[in-house]
Amino acid sequence: MAILEINHVSKFFGGLAAISDVSFSVEEGSIMGLIGPNGAGKTTLFNCITGYYPPSKGEIFFNGRRLNGLDPDKVCMLGMVRTWQKVRPLAKLSVVDNVMVGALAHTSSLRIARAWAMDQLKVVGMEHRADFIAGGLPIGERKKLEVARALATRPKLLLLDEVMGGLNPAESDEIIQLILDIKKHGLTQMVIEHDMKAIMRISDRIVVLTSGEKLMEGTPQEVVSNPDVISAYLGESHA
Amino acid sequence: MPKTILKAAAGLIVLALLMAIPKYVESPYALHMMILLFLSVSMGQSWNILGGFAGQYSVGHAAYFGVGAYTTMMLMQAKQIPPWIGVWVGMVLVVAVALAIGSICFRLRGPYFVLASIAVAEILRLSAINLTTLTNGAEGILVTELPAFKIGERVVTDFSTKVPFYYIGLFLALLTIGITYSVQHSKLGYFFQAIREDQDAAHSLGISISLYKNIALGISAVLTSLAGAFYGIYVGFVDPPTVLGLDVSVQIMLICIIGGMGTLWGPVLGALVLVPMSEALRSNMVTDLLVRVGLVNADSKVGLFLKENLAHAHVLLYGILVVLVILFMPDGLMGFVKKLARRRKQEAV
């Protein structure tokens, strides 16, 4: 069953079409990869899905519910949460307090929220950092904190925007493992990533965007063997 | 946890001392200073909830202070309604004003709330000057006779000394500290701070930004109006510049900025610094001190100049203080104290 359906979504900024007529759906329990060159509209699509920009055209359904025009906080309460490409830690708060903010979406008890937050920190392997001030974390741990905080809101669909960007190979491997672990728990994920090896390893299906349009959709094998994708990434001469 | 017990014990001792002061201290001047201190603590603490925790800088808190003060005084003068009833009317009005600003400005990003807060305070100040039938205009409202506070037939106090004001002030200061504490230790505090640190991140985590900003503003405005009403009945006089002027707004902010925003004890520290400082300047204590230590000759030109002008220079000195605080202690005195404590801890290890 499709948990997320995107039907003919377009987003215009003035006359510029950042996304034009993109449609696809994400199956429950799967990992959907979203790739494309810089400026292809991947993050804009995330912003449309999570309510930061209303789409100019088209419809978005989450669990059968129409999302157009719903604010990000409402979208989160419905069970869809995103992380940020440029990490956004609540810099002056401790790591566990950051995650508690997410956990408080569904409880008013600080005690319950703290316990739940510690569980999420264990999932990403950061429980030893709980009392550290979030602003002082290195980038690898900031990325993990983003994931833990998002998980704390008890999502059904997790949108990860370049969680491996800026990480070294060892750190990237940890994140890949983390994403696969999260999948085992039945959580659906949609992942934007530039690291092709990583995205091939984790995705069940991949959507390729170029300049706002959907170039193709398919399994990782189909995507790598498609000449259009190769030319979009490497230029015509390589196709 | 022995540390929490120690803290609680220290708190109780300070509280007992504060409760006992009027029993042993008879000097009205000393009591007056304490009352000003309590007032400043509650003003700073009220601003702290909105500015310090939720990160929304209001430069127009005089609006709430003034509406609280004026409503109570006007009802007392025109309708003989006692202040402990009038203050509730003030709170309702203040919530209406606050939510009118908040529901419009908190939808927008950028400096709109700051600007609107100043504008609203100025509109109210000008209205108070010009709506002479209601507010008595620039002459202000003078109410020297407070009705006696009775429970049943028993007269609790007739407000003939400063002592009842002392206890009301103390109650107000403790109330605002208590409310800040409970905000800090609840979902509200977490959400306010999340909004302060990163609005987009907070939004994505299920926090309704405009709702929680309005809640912060509402709490802050109500507490500020209480402080305003207390100021009105204590001084017995309100006029537009003293309760609705821009410098009232600035003073409220400064208590918090100097003490440390977003901390429980910051506004208390800020009040402890600012109240004695402005008093020392007002009463020319600084000049007297300079003369006494022999730095300045009282009859020289410099001495006369200082005597003449230093009392009016508190705004200038506030300015210098703010510059110093922002340069050297960006997290206020509280942040500075914490940093020192951390450093000492590290050295001890």
Image: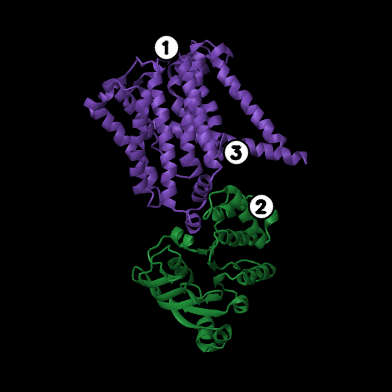
Chain colours: A green, B purple
* Chain for numbered disc 1: B
A147 is higher (above) or lower (below) than B235: below
The image position of residue A81, as x and y in percent, is 51, 63
Q: In the image, what residue type sits under mark 1?
A: Ser
Real-space Cα distance between discs 2 and 1? 55 Å
Q: In the image, what residue type sits under mark 3?
A: Gly
Q: Which residue is mark 2?
A: A130
Q: Which residue is mark 3?
A: B335
Residue at the image position 58 percent from the left and 38 percent from the top: B328
Residue at the image position 57 percent from the left and 34 percent from the top: B265
Q: In the image, what residue type sits under mark 2?
A: Ala
- Depth check: A24 or B340 in front? A24
- Depth check: B334 or B293 in front? B334
* Chain for numbered disc 2: A
Q: Is residue A31 visible?
A: yes
Real-space Cα distance between discs 2 and 3? 21 Å
Q: Earlier in the sequence, mark 3 or mark 1?
A: 1
Quadrant for residue A160, please give it: bottom right
Instruction: Give the number of the disc on residue B160.
Output: 1
Residue at the far left in the pictured view: B133
A18 is higher (above) or lower (below) than B41: below
The image position of residue A34, as x and y in percent, is 52, 75
Mark in front: 2 vs 1: 1
Task: Label 2, secondary structure: give it.
Answer: loop
Task: Label 3, secondary structure: give it.
Answer: helix
Mark in front: 3 vs 1: 1
Real-space Cα distance between discs 3 and 1? 41 Å
* Chain for numbered disc 3: B
